[in-house]
Image (cartoon, rainbow, N blue to C red):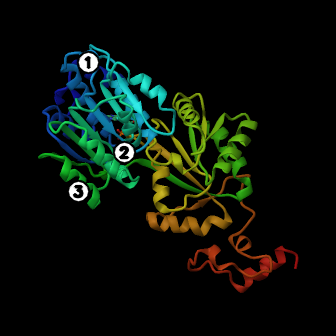
Amino acid sequence: MPFSSLGLSPALLRAISAKAYLAPTPIQTAAIPAALQGRDVLGSAQTGSGKTAAFVLPLLQQLEKTPFESPRRVAALILVPTRELCAQVGEEIRELALHLPRAVKVSIVFGGVSINPQMMRLRGGTDIVVATPGRLLDLVQHNALSLGSVTTLVLDEADRLLDMGFTEELARILTMLPAQRQNLFFSATFPAAVQALAQTLLRDPVRIEVLPAPQSAPDIVQRAIAVDAGQRTQLLRHLIQQNHWSRVLVFVATKHAAEMVADKLRKARIYAEPFHGELSQGKRTQVLADFKASRLKVVIATDVAARGLDIAQLPVVVNFDLPRSAVDYTHRIGRTGRAGESGVALSFVSADTEAHFRLIEKRQGLSLPLEQIEGFEPQQTAVAAATAMDGTPIDSANGGIKGKRPSKKDKLRAAAARGQ
Ligand code: AMP
């Protein structure tokens, strides 16, 4: 089904084709006509399904039909859990609104940065607010905006909004909205709290469930590479240069590691930047913008970047340090292979992390061969890494995996290697 049969205006169809969206995704096919008719929508969909455009396009079409008023009044409120998602949704709105007959003013508000520029931007009113709940309430308290004219409320990633402890803020915001409004509700999962919220909010919603269909599952090639821990930076450098990767997201365990690895790559003239929770918001925004605009080739990130980030055409993700859990592994590798593109996810596995990797693999139902790269063959074995200074094997290092417990021969070999 083409976009043109969903009932969208020519100005929006032009913006869609400029973004090179060829056909609507399943959530768009189902949600756009329903939302255009003014119905409430309950969408069960993951990030990557195209859900942002599914709610942005009907909002914009509604604005297109509304006569311009000065000062502007908030017509749509979009609540999201994180600053990064705020920025992404804002960008999608700006791009899709590009050809509308009148300029649409979008205000992005989130905490962790000075409130003053956000208050300034809200002067003269705004058409759409994309917000995290806490900062939105601060702004309302400062009389920087009023929510009394909202005709559409969008809750994006409702499950994460609740997970992140925004329940009370949400309840307060809901009391400020007109009772007569359209509600578009999206969540990846539906635990009891999310279902209860949906029930209080929505009136006779159109229910849409988009299961990740096997044919639309991301096309991600997963590889595991055996390498000594101390050789990982050199291997990363080698792989980036040899494969001419245009854009790489590398995950590490700590902010210190992010700074260190980025620093070493820069010394090798590979333009890399760290990305972690202790950078200022300004710096984080700039790193992301540079990365998206291809001014920056490598980002070395902690798990702060693993959720919610959407970078089109990110061909490679590297687990320099392994994630703590199988769930984190899924989030990390999900940064590549988005929107029908293919991607590669590499995990560096060293002797002391092999057992942990095998556990992640097991939880993922995977079985990956441990590859070796010429010139970077590991010298350390799991046994050597798992052997304490006095030669006693450390049980936890083999993760209790059958067949990995060092034999008597292994212990003798380890002792010989230490020159005993
Ligand atoms: P979302 O689920 O909204 O985060 O969207 C994930 C990615 O899919 C974003 O990079 C969008 O730009 C892209 N996208 C959204 N709709 C389409 C479409 N119909 N065709 C191709 N890409 C799309």
What residue lies at 84% left-to-right and 74% top-to-bottom? 418
| Amino acid at the residue labelled 2 | Thr
Question: Is residue 230 shown above or below 182?
Answer: below
What residue lies at 52% left-to-right and 48% top-to-bottom? 304
Q: Where's residue 296, x and y in %?
A: 60, 32
The quarter of the picture where the N terminus appears is top left
Q: CA distance from mark 1 to mark 2?
A: 26 Å
The yes-or-no answer for disc 3 within 8 Å of ligand 1 is: no
Residue 47, labelled with which disc? 2
Question: Is residue 167 shown above or below 120?
Answer: below
Q: CA distance from mark 2 to mark 3?
A: 22 Å
Label 1 element class: helix
Between circles 2 and 3, the one closer to the viewer is 3
Q: Residue furthest front?
A: 142
Residue at numbered disc 3: 196
| Amino acid at the residue labelled 1 | Ala
Left/right of residue 134 with respect to residue 401 in the rendered view: left
| Amino acid at the residue labelled 3 | Ala
